[in-house]
């Protein structure tokens, strides 16, 4: 997205600890805007489990049209323990991802300090890769059916839906990203070609074809089960990984753990031609809500990714550097309640170190 004089940012604080961490991200964004001289305005949208319980409303097509007027969306977390699983997820988060065609879920896995890595003898130089997760198809498409529901003969079918165009645009994005990232210039396809012989045949063929256009990028393949093994054993092998929606969901939770936990893991739902949405990848953490103990760094890093996306790369870089500095020199843990500081104090620390 090109530079603008006045960015418009939609903010969805959501449920649980979402509003607390979003407040810290906005605090940091505000400080960064002064330092780097850019202007923005925000508008809050109250899509959430809370609102659904009160009004029955999720995200409507009209809401989506409204959001299209913004340069980016900043999301805290949605989900309420009093709502049956699946309703808020599909009605808010997945609705936004799909309706805004945010077909990439970009999840950097980067260790900022060896102190917070659960793996023995792994250091920041060993854990620094990015997962490009397809974000609009696969098992998330919601296709399937029950047969003879509730009987002994019941069959439940859930379809993994993969289109050539959908797979290709994701793979192409991953190649472009590997080139731009300019580190090991290695792109690994993570799949399951040995068992899922329709879906992964398409992925593999598309990957091989697109690879021909990127002779400067080394390519590799790993089955998804082996990928989880390598994340623990040899994370230093990875640079950029491209995978489908379901596998990407699973491996990025493991990725979050080896980078120090949900408190630090951020991601972006990206439509390269449209409106993207940035979020901490952890959930709404109901048990920590309102206690000022949750780690806001994932949300602060998501704010950094948002700024990079709208064209403020310097501010983004500076936010990440400040986060690295306080993680290395101030915090006693990245876990909620154990940081040595409250949620708002961590936000203040980042601001002071910009
Ligand atoms: C994530 C989450 C979501 C997903 C859920 C909340 C629908 O786990 O962003 O990884 O499965 O994509
Ligand atoms: Mn997930």
Image: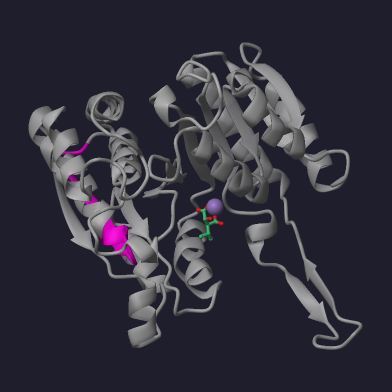
Q: Residue at x 61, y 22 (%)?
A: 238
Q: Quadrant of residue 144?
A: bottom right
Percent across and percent down for residue 312 are 25, 31
**Could you tell me which quadrant the C terminus lies in?**
top left
Whether 215 is among the magenta residues is: no
Residue 54 vertical position relative to residue 274 in the rendered view, above or below? below
Q: Residue 240 location, x and y as percent?
A: 57, 26
Judge from the rendering whether residue 37 lies leftward or rightward of residue 88; answer left or right. Answer: left
Q: Is residue 151 above or below residue 122?
A: below
Q: Where does residue 208 sit, x and y in percent of width and height?
A: 76, 26
In the rendered image, which quarter is residue 48 located in? bottom left
The percent position of residue 287, horizontal first and vertical second, equals 37, 65
In the image, residue 10 lies in the stretch drawn in magenta: yes
Residue 64, quarter of picture: bottom left
Instruction: Give the camera-side residue of 314 and 252.
Output: 252
Query: Could you tell whether 340 is left or right of 146 in the image?
Result: left
Q: Which residues are magenta?
A: 4-19
In the displayed structure image, the side of residue 92 where residue 215 appears, left or right: right
User: Which residue occupies the extreme right position in the image?
Assistant: 153
Look at the picture and state if 176 lies above or below 82.
Answer: above
The structure residue drawn at horizontal position 54% and vertical position 48%, both measured from the top left corner, is: 103
Instruction: Report the residue at 8% width, 34% height from top.
Output: 34
The image's colour scheme reads one colour
- Please name the residue shown 53% across and 78% down the image: 84
Q: How many marks?
A: 0
Query: Which quadrant would the N terminus be assigned to in this image?
Result: top left
């Amino acid at each position: 997205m090109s530079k603008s004089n006045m960015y418009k940012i939609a903010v969805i604080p959501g449920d649980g600890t979402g509003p607390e961490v979003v407040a810290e991200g906005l605090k940091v964004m505000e400080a960064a805007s002064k330092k780097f001289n850019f202007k923005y305005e925000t508008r809050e949208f109250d899509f959430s489990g809370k609102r659904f319980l009160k009004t029955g409303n999720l995200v409507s097509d009209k809401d989506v049209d409204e959001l299209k007027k913004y340069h980016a969306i900043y999301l805290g977390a949605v989900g309420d323990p009093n709502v049956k699983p699946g309703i808020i997820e599909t009605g808010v988060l997945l609705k936004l991802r799909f309706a805004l065609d945010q077909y990439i879920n970009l999840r950097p896995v980067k260790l900022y300090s060896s102190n917070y890595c659960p793996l023995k003898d792994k250091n920041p130089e060993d854990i620094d890769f990015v997962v490009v997760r397809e974000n609009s198809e696969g098992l998330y498409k919601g296709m399937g059916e029950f047969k003879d529901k509730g009987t002994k003969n019941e069959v439940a079918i859930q379809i993994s839906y993969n289109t050539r165009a959908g797979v290709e645009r994701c793979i192409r994005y991953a190649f472009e990203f590997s080139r731009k990232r300019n580190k090991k210039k290695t792109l690994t396809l993570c799949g399951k070609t040995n068992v899922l012989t329709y879906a992964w045949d398409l992925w593999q063929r598309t990957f091989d074809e697109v690879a021909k256009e990127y002779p400067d990028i080394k390519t590799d393949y790993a089955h998804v089960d082996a990928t989880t093994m390598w994340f623990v054993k040899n994370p230093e092998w990875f640079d950029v990984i491209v995978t489908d929606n379901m596998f990407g969901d699973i491996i990025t939770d493991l990725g979050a753990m080896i980078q120090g936990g949900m408190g630090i893991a951020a991601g972006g739902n990206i439509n390269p031609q449209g409106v993207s949405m940035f979020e901490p990848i952890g959930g709404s953490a109901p048990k920590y809500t309102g206690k000022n103990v949750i780690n806001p760094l994932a949300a602060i890093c998501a704010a950094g990714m948002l700024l990079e996306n709208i064209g403020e790369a310097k501010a983004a870089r500076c936010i990440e550097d400040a986060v690295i500095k306080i993680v290395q020199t101030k915090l006693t843990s990245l876990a909620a309640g154990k940081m040595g500081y409250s949620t708002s104090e961590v936000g203040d620390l980042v601001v002071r170190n910009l």
